Amino acid sequence: MVEATTLIENFPYLGIFVLLFLGDVGLPFPEDATLLLSGFLIANGMIKPLPALLVIYPSLLGTDFLLYLIGKKYGRRVVEHKRFGRIISVERFSKIEEKFKRWGILVVFFGRHLLGLRAQVFLAAGMLRMSAIHFLIADGASAILTVTLMVGLGYWGGSSIEILKKDVRGIEHIAIVVFVLLLAIFIVFKYFRNRSKFKGR
């Protein structure tokens, strides 16, 4: 985590890209926490909004599409792979496959909002030979919601801290900051809890 903090401080845009990529392939860098951090950095003038969004959005789509391509290339052999087999088991794939048969591309749209299931859904989409265009449309639309919500919350929290510097007595702003921090803690907690449940199966 120290290395991640150093990377963000010295190379913020590269740092955001790296954290999003690592989080998407299953490492302990939750995507939502990185987006919250990005909003916070924008609010405090550490990064510019437009360059940040030009890094964030393509990074999300790129890493998601990479998982899709891996699933499409290797098919059901993914569940036997040493690395990716840890992300999606045979049992989990069967359950996701049933969802795809019932809901189609909506599984991709809603799947990216489910902590611990994103990478599994993207791999499964490729394994089930979903059209690349359909995948990108569903994931692209879903990513817009994710970026708007999470970066917006981070920006809101960062702006509130700046207001508090000018008006310490603003109790309502303290509530906002506490809310954002609790939300970030909740997201990280859910992420690790889902991972522990997955490993236990």
Image (cartoon, grey):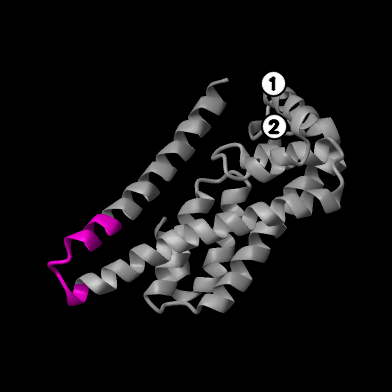
The residue at which mark 1 appears reads as 91
Label 1: few (<14), some (14–19) or many (≥20) C-alpha neighbours in 10 Å: few
Q: Position of residue 13 (x, y in %)?
A: 54, 72
Would residue 168 be counted in the magenta stretch?
yes
Point out residue 162 in the picture as x, y percentages from the top left corner.
28, 73
Which residue type carries mark 1? Answer: Glu
- Between marks 2 and 1, how big is the CA–CA gap? 11 Å
Kind of residue at disc 2: Gly
Q: Would residue 178 appear left or right of 98 to someone viewing this image?
A: left
Q: Which quadrant would residue 186 be assigned to in this image?
A: top left
Residue 32: x, y in percent? 50, 52
Residue named by callout 2: 85
Q: Residue at x 42, y 71 (%)?
A: 41
Q: Nearer the viewer, residue 87 or 127?
A: 127
The image shows residue 134 at horizontal and vertical percentages of: 82, 49
Q: Give the number of the mark in front: 2 or 1.
A: 1
Magenta segment's dominant SS is helix
- Whether residue 33 sits left or right of residue 98 in the image: it is left
Badge 2, how many Cα within 10 Å: few under 14, some, many 20+?
some
For the magenta stretch, what is the residue range? 165-177
Q: Is residue 5 visible?
A: no
The answer to whether residue 85 is visible is yes
Check disc 2 and report its element: helix, strand or loop. helix
Left or right placement of residue 51 versus residue 196 in this view: right
**Residue extending farthest left:** 169
Query: Which of 96/27 is in front?
Result: 96
Which quadrant: the C terminus? top right
Q: Quadrant of residue 1?
A: bottom left
Q: Is residue 194 magenta?
A: no
Q: Residue at x 37, y 48 (%)?
A: 183
Kind of element beneath mark 1: helix
